[in-house]
Amino acid sequence: MLNETAKGVYTIAVTPFLPDGAIDFDSIDRMVDFYIEQGATGLTILGMMGEAGKLSAHESMQVVDRVIARTSVPVVVGVSAPGYAAMETLSKASMDAGAAGVMVAPTSNLRSDSQITAYYHGAARVLGDAPFVLQDFPLATGVVIPTNVILQIVDDCPTCVMLKHEDWPGLEKITALRAASDAGSRRISILCGNGGMYLLEEILRGADGAMTGFAYPEMMAQVVAAVNAGDESRARDIFDAYMPMVRYEAQPGLGLAIRKYSLAQRGAIAHPTLRNPGATLNAIAAREVDILAQRQTAALRKLGV
Amino acid sequence: MLNETAKGVYTIAVTPFLPDGAIDFDSIDRMVDFYIEQGATGLTILGMMGEAGKLSAHESMQVVDRVIARTSVPVVVGVSAPGYAAMETLSKASMDAGAAGVMVAPTSNLRSDSQITAYYHGAARVLGDAPFVLQDFPLATGVVIPTNVILQIVDDCPTCVMLKHEDWPGLEKITALRAASDAGSRRISILCGNGGMYLLEEILRGADGAMTGFAYPEMMAQVVAAVNAGDESRARDIFDAYMPMVRYEAQPGLGLAIRKYSLAQRGAIAHPTLRNPGATLNAIAAREVDILAQRQTAALRKLGV
Amino acid sequence: MLNETAKGVYTIAVTPFLPDGAIDFDSIDRMVDFYIEQGATGLTILGMMGEAGKLSAHESMQVVDRVIARTSVPVVVGVSAPGYAAMETLSKASMDAGAAGVMVAPTSNLRSDSQITAYYHGAARVLGDAPFVLQDFPLATGVVIPTNVILQIVDDCPTCVMLKHEDWPGLEKITALRAASDAGSRRISILCGNGGMYLLEEILRGADGAMTGFAYPEMMAQVVAAVNAGDESRARDIFDAYMPMVRYEAQPGLGLAIRKYSLAQRGAIAHPTLRNPGATLNAIAAREVDILAQRQTAALRKLGV
Amino acid sequence: MLNETAKGVYTIAVTPFLPDGAIDFDSIDRMVDFYIEQGATGLTILGMMGEAGKLSAHESMQVVDRVIARTSVPVVVGVSAPGYAAMETLSKASMDAGAAGVMVAPTSNLRSDSQITAYYHGAARVLGDAPFVLQDFPLATGVVIPTNVILQIVDDCPTCVMLKHEDWPGLEKITALRAASDAGSRRISILCGNGGMYLLEEILRGADGAMTGFAYPEMMAQVVAAVNAGDESRARDIFDAYMPMVRYEAQPGLGLAIRKYSLAQRGAIAHPTLRNPGATLNAIAAREVDILAQRQTAALRKLGV
């Protein structure tokens, strides 16, 4: 079961598809193995980057079952939904299937501190015993969750054990949350998103790791390990070597197509296919990624990584 | 099967719930009977005001089956979804169950004429033979669909047979669409939403009727009938008598709670319950509705309605 | 000087233009006289419906000076701006010119309770002694201001003397604010917007009047007077008689063109011109307004108004 | 006068303030000199990052005059405004003062291809002979301008001579625009924004340079020069060396504070002050910038830059 001590790298998994749009179950197995080989200490599935909204309810559970059957690392399942009923159904089924916890983003209509708090109170109630991750991703949800609101939810809901930190800018929020837990507030796990773009600073400010889907999960593992080993300089060297690719993948709307292209190139999945409607990578963009990958390899070799 | 000649009143049906949030199937039957007694010539289910997003996939089909089993008027099923896969699944199941057609709103990320057109091309492809309603509701979706884009979609997709017109302001759009069909574009059915607030002018500009869920569907039936009978003055008298209630129900966020309260007061459904998370009507607001209802009854009596 | 006891009807004034887009100063005089003859107890200028954003800084002050020179009723000047510097400049000049107070809407980037509070703290500081109106208009600004945030601002800023209430739905907010002042919070004036669409219920829930620009300001004056005289039934009769026109004018984007057309028809301004870029009313819409005006006149005559 | 052949680096200039918020005119001089020493071939002032919205009309012209008096490189003035009147006033005054051209972003209410085209037709009319830059920045304006709409505006408005390209993702747009001009459409200058985050790929796809305000304008000059010299590999080496700082400055809301801090550290302006309301950089963040700057210097030294 997921709890407040979670750390390391929870990779946001893609959902692999065959060229005709059907779920590619063989690639799920290969991808799970790949993520873990590259240093993932947990997996998060059915998030926004997992194209969760494009799956039927039946397919969602097929993905949950397949991933959990393949690995023993903790699996977090995204259960965000417009209503609590669908959230409850998917959460219960996932926990029964062996998930470690679930993740909940706020619905995009929430517009004030008290509306957000009330929403999470309600969510915690329907989720019951399931530990949950509060997903804080204003760029995608349109909902800004201030630090004091996060602390209130942590205070009110014992099952809130982790923050998926994806506010942008969000560095001050980490500092403020850690100051609050130092002052007596319950300390929850903070894993960071945004494709890893600010991971270095996030870790130094007190985050426990990453929860994001950058196509090179080893970057997050290596950076976290170097910081934990006390070698900030080496952490920065590694981080910087990946940065040109990180920022290329950060293009909104196109990012998932880039990520799936890279994963397919690396053999983690068989096809870069996104389900419709979804962006595709053309030949020029694919070549841009190839060049970045070659230079990245060279830069890492120089560092002895 | 739904086609371009559809007219009259397609009531947007609520989804009735028991106080504990379970679907109230008995009330579905009663509600269907009520809508048709009050003049509905068709029903639209699983729309935004049907709390579609709060139902599980299984429940959605239960509602579809129950409504279709109860009535012989055409039933349109809302199948809007973030991805085509879920849309295809629900559409196919609904058409197999006997639905007359389906309704598709654009996803909220669409941001230009060509993106919108491409989205409907893709939707028409996965819907196959199912006739579909283009839902044009910018206030809820954030997507503005210009007249020329609607005409392009009508031109490209023979299965697009109806516009659920809910742009605001949208009167000029009706006039422009009718001018286009007079000039040779395929003429599709236009049924209007916005809770009936502009129905009088909409009909006079060429709309074929209403597709909205105002708790007094007889208003729409009576106004359409009076206009069709050539008695514009009487149509206006009736329309104006309902207007204080129409505008009260038009409060966004709260509107559905008001509507369900009125339907429960009228005996159409057993409970005014909304599924969580949803607004509720407190005692002061309920009293405001009661007074409006009493005055409305008195005004209609004077008109001999 | 504006204070917490303000009540009645503060009309949101349009800015009249000549057909070539220049400010029509003669019409300003006529319009001011008209508003006051129709029952305005105050005027609000340079608001959103005053096309403030389309005026140069110099023109804004010309309008302020002209209006204040023409009347002795209190004049509130809209001073909302992206930065405090422009706000301070216009506020100081307006107060020096004889304005009774100023009005401030939040900037659209504010996204949490504490950000909103901080913004008004800063605004109050630069406004100095000038009494100010807090404009709460989420549909236009995108900023939702919860009741507790309004109360906090009222508590922190003694110069906040009025709420321009334009939340939608917003009836509960009035009830909650009045409950708070009954319980000891400083009671400020609440004048309501939204084109008068909910004025009846707003007054009954404790609002002090209207601050809106419906082209028939006498409606607001008559409704407020009837409620104050204890004759709720007559207030409703009058209110309902205007409702078809109120809802027609409520069309966003087009509403100001409708309003200026009506004001020009009534002789309050010489031309219905909006400054570019702005909507215009075509012949069909103008005829729709004409019919509504004729029916309105007839309905009011029946009521002996 | 600005024309279609413009290339190189047009730095988006900040507006320097004294600690009390007054304009720091001495720093304007120093900053202009600094930008040009670092390789700027033009300057753009009064853009969003110039805090234009926080200046009074009088102050805006003071800034325009001071900058133009100090330099002979072309100066582009941001004249975006809610209405054409203010746009016309500022544009005319700026061109009279010696500006090379003006820049116009779409107003945020535009919602379809034809609305955007119509808006620029109107803008071009009021701007008269002044060459203008079309600012395409959806993240800030909320307005997506498809490629075909840009081409239409270029076709219709001979005074549209440049695109400030800031769509995200936007690489395909550059490729499409260049394909169109290769096919006969008028070729305009394309200078890219987004803080330089994609400059390398943008130049390779056919952009003519950068128009952005990254605190190290020499990066843009060096990258453009290396690409023009045919040394793509060196261009990438330089680009990558700056990338950790580029992405740190890319934090929305906080970015300008970071930029001003860096400019103050570099001696380009005397104070990092933003006008109220605006973000400030605290000590932790300042230290993060300092470390990035040190590492950047070291990386560039290795490259012999």
Image (cartoon, coloured by chain):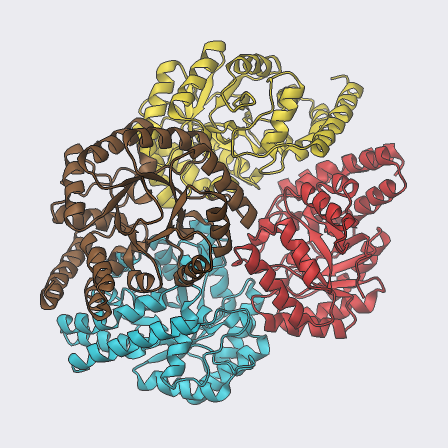
Chain colours: A cyan, B red, C yellow, D brown
* Residue A54 in the image, given as x and y percentages of width and height: 55, 71
Q: Would residue A57 appear left or right of A129 to someone viewing this image?
A: right
Q: Identify the residue at image location x=55%, y=60%.
A: B115
* Residue C220 in the image, given as x and y percentages of width and height: 62, 23
Q: Identify the residue at image location x=68%, y=65%.
A: B23
Q: Identify the residue at image location x=73%, y=26%.
A: C290
- Residue C124: quarter of image: top left
| A267 or A197: nearer the viewer | A267
> Considering the image in quadrants, where does the C terminus of chain A appear?
bottom left
Q: Is residue A173 above or below residue B229?
A: below
- Residue C215: quarter of image: top right
* Residue B9 in the image, given as x and y percentages of width and height: 80, 52
Residue C228 visible in the snapshot: no
| D121 or B225: nearer the viewer | D121
Residue A149 visible in the snapshot: yes
| B18 or C52: nearer the viewer | C52
Q: Would residue A171 appear left or right of A111 to someone viewing this image?
A: left
* Residue D86 in the image, given as x and y percentages of width and height: 41, 30
Q: Is residue B124 above or below residue C48?
A: below
> Considering the image in quadrants, where does the N terminus of chain A appear?
bottom left
Q: Is residue B114 above or below residue C65?
A: below
Count of labels in the image: 0
